[in-house]
Image (tube, rainbow, N blue to C red):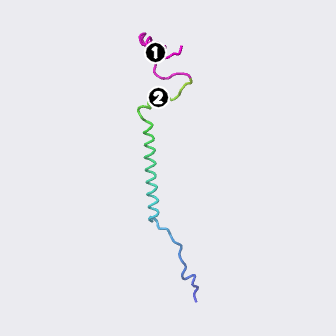
């Protein structure tokens, strides 16, 4: 009489190369990689706006770094003094 366990032993399930699960995980990784690259590119290009070029990167406390003010003429100065007098409580 033969031993039934040796005759009908089950083989361990083997993963087949290129199965559907492996393909799905690879396509998911490709999609995630593509989205990551697109986001990185968008953030990089965002930093290159025209308005942000040639702006000061370091600031000194108490020092105005903007454009210099224009001199105002005497007539404008007189008008400003009159306006200040109207706004004062004295």
In which quadrant will I find the C terminus? top right
Q: Nearer the viewer, residue 58 or 18?
A: 58
> Given this view, does label 1 or label 2 mark the residue nearer the observer?
1
Question: What residue sits 56% from the left and 24% below the top?
Answer: 61
Q: Which residues are magenta?
A: 62-90
Q: Is residue 63 magenta?
A: yes
Question: What residue sits 43% from the left and 9% below the top?
Answer: 74
Considering only vertical position in the picture, is 19 above or below 80? Answer: below
The label shown at residue 55 is: 2
In which quadrant will I find the N terminus? bottom right
Q: Nearer the viewer, residue 69 or 33?
A: 69
Q: Nearer the viewer, residue 42 or 18?
A: 42
Task: Please tell me how crowded label 2 is: few (under 14), some (14-19), or many (20+) other residues with Cα within 10 Å.
Answer: few
Q: Residue furthest top?
A: 74
Q: Residue furthest bottom?
A: 1
Residue 39: where, in percent of width, then height? 45, 45
- Residue 70 figure quarter: top left
**Residue that label 1 marks:** 83
Residue 25: where, in percent of width, then height? 47, 59
Residue 11: where, in percent of width, then height? 53, 75
Which structural element holds mark 2?
loop
The label shown at residue 54 is: none
Residue 62: where, in percent of width, then height? 56, 22
Which tag, 1 or 2, sits closer to the chain's start?
Answer: 2
């Amino acid at each position: 009489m033969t031993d039934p366990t040796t005759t009908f032993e089950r083989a361990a399930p083997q993963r087949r190369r290129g199965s559907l699960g492996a393909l799905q995980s690879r396509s998911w990784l490709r999609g995630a990689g593509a989205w990551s690259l697109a986001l990185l590119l968008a953030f990089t290009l965002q930093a290159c706006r025209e308005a942000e070029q040639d702006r000061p990167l370091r600031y000194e406390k108490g020092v105005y770094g903007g454009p210099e003010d224009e001199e105002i003429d005497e007539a404008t100065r007189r008008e400003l003094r009159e306006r200040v007098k109207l706004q004062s409580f004295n």
